[in-house]
Image (cartoon, rainbow, N blue to C red):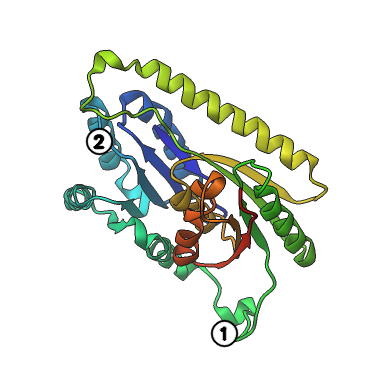
Amino acid sequence: MFQFIPVTEGNIFAIKAIGKLTDEDYQELLPQLTTLIHKYGPISLLVELEDFRGWEPKAAWDDFAFGKEHEKGFERVAIVGKKSWHKWMTMIGSAFSETKIRFFYSDDLQEAWNWLREGGKKEKPSAKVLGEPAPHELMPYERVLVALDFSPNSDLALARAVEIARHYNAKLLLLHVVESIFYPNLDLDPLMINPVDFMEMDQAVHDYAVARIKKLADNLDYPDIQHEVLWGTPKSTVLSYAEAQNADLIVAGSHGKHGIARLLGSTAGGIVHGAGCDVIVVKLPEG
């Protein structure tokens, strides 16, 4: 399936390609891309491959046909993946296209975003016109992102994020990540697996998370909140969303052992090393 990652800037858009892509996935995505091209002119696109398993035959043709038909509708396309065949696939695709297409490994996510942004620099005012500060001057935080898993301990990270957002009068971004369990090991006996059961479980978890984060946002006494539930692995999804939203601070919790360690503990180190902005790690109690 495809999932759009909300982006805050210009003509840059981002999507995740998850699992094995089908014709139905493309029939839902392509009209949306066509609308964006017609509205914004040539767009730049980041495609993040998340547990990507290729295409069904009809879906592969959908991808190729749309790319050829709308070749002038794309300025730059950055493909972000983890495997060597993802890079090989990108190189083959770029050979048949006039669009600037580049592959980046997941650890180079920041570089991928920088490359997309370079494509639009000619349309942006100079730093002098914008009145940007000297490099040594610290700027106030404007967009504070906090990753949540709804556990009682993660409330401490949220409280710290709210405190910082209030101090700087910043926008508060709440993010919860849902890891899909739909795609089982393909080596297993298919008679032992009912894909519908996996899909229903995934959707139930996602729907619960959407309701939960909305309730949490509604109950916070803060005027400027944006909340999202995205599919994916915690570290890469937090980093990708932070880049897409131009977050200048990520707040994460960590106690490094169990419980929320899966989302906010062991992942916190990856966020610290991979983020293109400041990161505050809130020490959480054990247990």
Write down the quadrant of residue 137 in the picture: bottom right
Q: Is residue 54 above or below residue 268?
A: above
Question: Given the current orientation, which residue lies at the most extreme right position?
Answer: 221
Closer-to-camera residue (270/68): 270
Question: Given the current orientation, which residue lies at the most extreme top position?
Answer: 191
Please tell me whether mark 2 sits on a helix, a strand or a loop.
loop
Residue linked to disc 2: 54
Q: Amino acid at mark 2?
A: Gly
Q: Amino acid at mark 1?
A: Pro
Closer-to-camera residue (20/22): 20
Q: Classify residue 31 as left or right of residue 280.
A: left
Give how far across and how far down residue 224 sits, in percent.
75, 51
At x 50% / y 25%, what residue is drawn? 203
Q: Classify residue 177 as left or right of residue 169.
A: left
At x 49% / y 64%, what residue is drawn? 275
Residue linked to disc 1: 135
Write down the quadrant of residue 9 in the picture: bottom right
Give how far across and how far down residue 200 sits, in percent.
47, 19
Disc marking residue 77:
none
Task: Give the total of numbered labels.
Answer: 2
Q: Is residue 207 above or below residue 99?
A: above
Closer-to-camera residue (45/70): 45
Q: CA distance from mark 1 to mark 2?
A: 43 Å
Q: Classify residue 51 as left or right of residue 127.
A: left
Question: Given the current orientation, which residue lies at the most extreme front position?
Answer: 287
